[in-house]
Amino acid sequence: MTQTTPTVLWNDSADPLELTQSMRWGCVGATCNPVIAYTTIKKHPEIWGPRIREIAERMPTAGEAEIGWQAVKDMTVEAAKLLEPIFEKYAGRNGRVSVQTNPRLHRNKDALVAQAVEFDALAKNIIVKIPATKTGIAAMEEATYRGVSINATVSFTVPQAVAVGEAIERALIRREAEGLDVTRMGPVVTIMGGRLDDWLKKVVTRDKLTIDPGYLEWAGVAALKRGYQVFTERGYRSRILSAAFRNHMQWSELIGGDLVVSPPFAWQQKFNSSGIEPVSRINKQVDSRILEALEKIPDFVRAFEVDGMTIEEFENFGSCSTTLRQFLAADADLDALVRDIIVPAP
């Protein structure tokens, strides 16, 4: 795929060990979020325990949250260094590492923008994740205007992706009008297809709807293909990114598109041994029978149609509120992990 199509691979983790191996498979970027960052730190206590204690000694007045976020920033800078040659090769379009804004700031546009600018300064090849809510999209537009490359997250639907694509275009046009450079910016717009699938499965159970369970595996794929089609038709300069993998189709059905697939390392291992031929399928439409069945689910229609939701409705869509809560919980878990390291139980 990475050698024969315009589709590129980003590793869904900034873990240096995973990223190094993924780069051998053609990976040209990395993504991260609070859950992934927490999991990486927890998985390698022999590495991060001493480092967190060192950060605490270096920052003697810092609390758990500040220490934890410094560890995340350190991890990000190290991953950025690994990807720097790729960043130069692609003139900023790839070779970036994502770092997500603090989920506790999700209601505060100015705080999100300020943190995006702070993270952007960590390395020249940073891309900053901000949630695709009404507040987050306003923050993304302002941060893009300030020269920050954005990766929209907490994003599951076509209307969210389109709203972000439009906001980024407005900001890029504004920069160009003022003579500011945009040539090395590399924005992407995530659609977390697997998390859309997760939500619709809950809806079907809740509402006692009868649908072929295999069809529910196609909802995220359908949204990703539709989002890519709209971005291509409208000429948006940001790219669609496929994340939150639940099945191989969230990779195989997107091959051939000028977009990013960002599976976790374990999924990359599965794909490499799957025997699935990496041929272009991006323009192959989802079977009409599957779409007709999915369209019986109101929340699929909201997710699939360009005008399926207003920007005010994004935050209360099931996938969005579920994921925001998970990210907030992961941030609290990171606080607790840091607390256990710097104030160990007797």
Image (cartoon, rainbow, N blue to C red):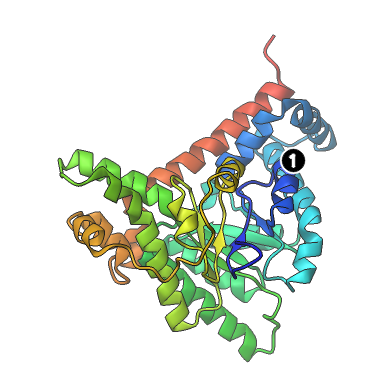
Toward the top, the furthest residue is: 346
Residue 191, how many percent across, how many down?
45, 59
Quarter of the image for residue 49 reads top right
- Residue situated in front as seen by the camera: 54 or 42: 42
Instruction: Tell me: 168 left or right of 162.
Output: right
Which amino acid type corresponds to the residue marked 1 in the rendered image?
A: Leu
Instruction: Tell me: 322 left or right of 104.
Output: left
Question: Which residue sits at x=61%, y=76%?
Answer: 145
Q: Secondary structure at mark 1?
A: helix
Residue 312, how many percent across, how many down?
33, 63
Residue 224, how many percent across, how many down?
42, 63
- Residue situated in front as seen by the camera: 243 or 153: 243
Residue 280, how many percent across, how many down?
50, 67
Residue 331 vs 287, above or below: the answer is above
Quarter of the image for residue 231 reads bottom left
Question: Which residue sits at x=44%, y=60%?
Answer: 253
Question: Which residue sits at x=52%, y=79%?
Answer: 169
Question: Which residue sits at x=63%, y=56%?
Answer: 10
How many numbered discs, if any? 1
**Can I make out residue 73 in this image?**
no
Quarter of the image for residue 206 reads top left
Figure quadrant of the C terminus: top right
* Circle 1 residues within 10 Å: few <14, some 14–19, many ≥20: few
Figure quadrant of the N terminus: bottom right
**Which residue is tagged 1?**
17
**Can I make out residue 14 in this image?**
yes
